[in-house]
Amino acid sequence: MERKGKKKQDKGATLKGGPADKQDNQAGKPSTDESVDWQDVAKRALADLDNYKKQAEKDKFEMIRIVKGSALVKFLEIYDDLSRAIEFVEDEKTKQGLLAVKDKFLKMMESEGLETVIVEFGEKFDPMVMEAISYEDNELVKDNHVIEMVEAGLKVGDRVIKPAKVRVGK
């Protein structure tokens, strides 16, 4: 009969680190579990730290590139508004002044990595860098090739922030 408060114990089970393990270790030799090459551990930790630093630096530059691209998109909207406004200015001196501001604006954006995407007549339409504003019948170009670039596109590095607007033949 079992007494209350006592639990059955499995006599065959031993826990690691229990009396059986201590007897094996008494000969003075470390068991395989305790044998650690600390130089190898340190080298691996340093390599992991170095890899972490490289990844953190890469992530930082990627974040800067994304933020810079986002800021340039906002400036680009103002630049486009300025370009449209210049078309309606009749006074030549005012027009020249606004064109100078527009050029200065463009140079500032180019210094931040902005590049113009120019598309040539007859070039194959690429939806990654172009936006088709119309599809037209045209005997001079093959199907799905550019008839005319209406507006240049812009990119920062390999990221297109404004696709070139083009007319495409069909």
Image (cartoon, helix red, strand yellow):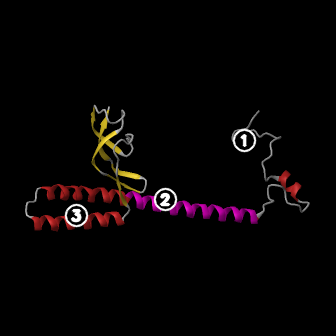
Q: Is residue 49 magenta?
A: yes
Residue, x 31% and y 42% (percent of image)? Answer: 131
Residue picked out by circle 2? 59
Looking at the image, is mark 1 or mark 3 nearer the viewer? Answer: 3
Along the viewing direction, whichever of 88 and 143 lies nearer the viewer: 143
Q: Secondary structure at mark 2?
A: helix
Disc 2 residue type (three-letter): Asp
The answer to whether residue 42 is left or right of residue 91 is right
Task: Determine contact: label 1, label 3, CB under 8 Å.
Answer: no
Residue 167 locus on image (x, y percent): 28, 40
Residue 41 in the image: above or below residue 151: below
Residue situated in front as seen by the camera: 26 or 35: 35
Q: Residues within 10 Å of mark 1 (few under 14, many from 20)?
A: few
Q: Which residues are magenta?
A: 39-66
User: Which residue: 51% across, 60% down?
Assistant: 58
Residue annotated with mark 1: 6
Mark 3 is surrounded, within 10 Å at the Cα level, by few (under 14), some (14 to 19) or many (20 or more) other residues, namely: some
Residue 84: name its quadrant.
Answer: bottom left
Sequence order check: which comes first, mark 3 or mark 2? 2
Is the C terminus in the top left, top right, bottom left or bottom right quadrant? Answer: top left
Quadrant in which residue 37 is drawn: bottom right
Tag shown at residue 102: 3
Task: Sort mark 2 into few (<14), some (14-19) or many (20+) by Cα contacts within 10 Å.
Answer: few
Q: Which mark is residue 44?
A: none
Give the residue type that dot 3 points to. Answer: Lys
Label 1 to label 3, Cα distance in Å?
Answer: 89 Å
Element at label 3? helix
Along the polypeptide, which appears first: circle 1 or circle 3?
1
Marks 2/1: CA distance?
59 Å
Which amino acid type is shown beneath numbered disc 1?
Lys
The rendered magenta stretch, by its main secondary structure, is classed as: helix
